[in-house]
Image (spheres, helix red, strand yellow):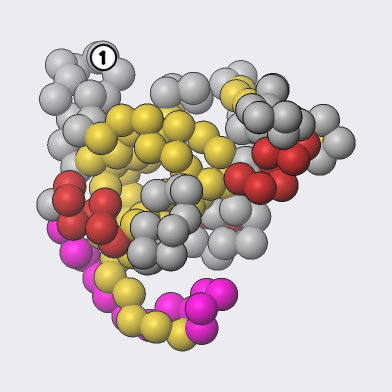
Amino acid sequence: MPSTQAGFKSGKDGATPSDLLVQVGPTLRVDIGLRSRAVAGQPPDLPRKNIKALIDTGAGGDCIDDDLAHSLGLPITDEGEMSGVGGRHHAFVYTARLFIPSLGRLLFQPFTGVKLQQGDQLHQIILGRPFLRNYRLTYDGRDGSVGLSDDS
């Protein structure tokens, strides 16, 4: 049963783990790209590593920062209108591989492009409800812990 933590164990500069969870949100570190450089049977070796991904229970889809997608040369596989906290806008959909080392999980799927870096966001990936449907999420705001597990 793969499981990992997406919360915080200790704060910096006097911030408690609970404070950090409120400020930053549940975060996983992921690797992303289109093609892996790993040999068969080994964990994927994707070009960008240790990217911050926000686990967002309010997101109806999985998203990637447009600037990150462009820098990786990800192919645009679709486009259309989407709606978010900034209202309705045009968005591109990119196909990418995303590897979550702490879960040993590789995804190959579409990600909607959003303007995270332009909005001074800490995260470059958003993992929403489609990602979460495969996991049990436990969130303890009192102690700043967030657990993610695959109970299958």
Name the secondary structure under disc 1: loop
Is 130 rendered above or below residue 138? below
Name the image quarter holding the C terminus: top right
Tell me which residue sits at (57%, 62%) in the image.
59
Q: Position of residue 136 (x, y in %)?
A: 69, 37
What kind of secondary structure does the magenta stretch mostly adopt?
strand
Can you identify the residue that label 1 sits on? 42
Is 86 rendered above or below residue 28? below
Q: Quadrant of residue 65?
A: bottom left
Q: Position of residue 146 (x, y in %)?
A: 70, 33
Tell me which residue sits at (17%, 20%) in the image.
38
Disc 1 crowd rating (10 Å Cα; few below 14, some 14-19, many 20+) is: few
**Can I make out residue 150 in this image?**
yes
Magenta span: 74-87
Q: Quadrant of residue 27?
A: top right
141 vs 135, nearest the viewer: 141
Q: Position of residue 30 (x, y in %)?
A: 40, 34
Is 23 rendered above or below residue 35? below
**Residue 91 among those drawn in magenta:** no
Is 29 rendered above or below residue 21? above
Tell me which residue sits at (43%, 64%) in the image.
119
**Residue 83 among those drawn in magenta:** yes
Q: Position of residue 142 (x, y in %)?
A: 86, 36
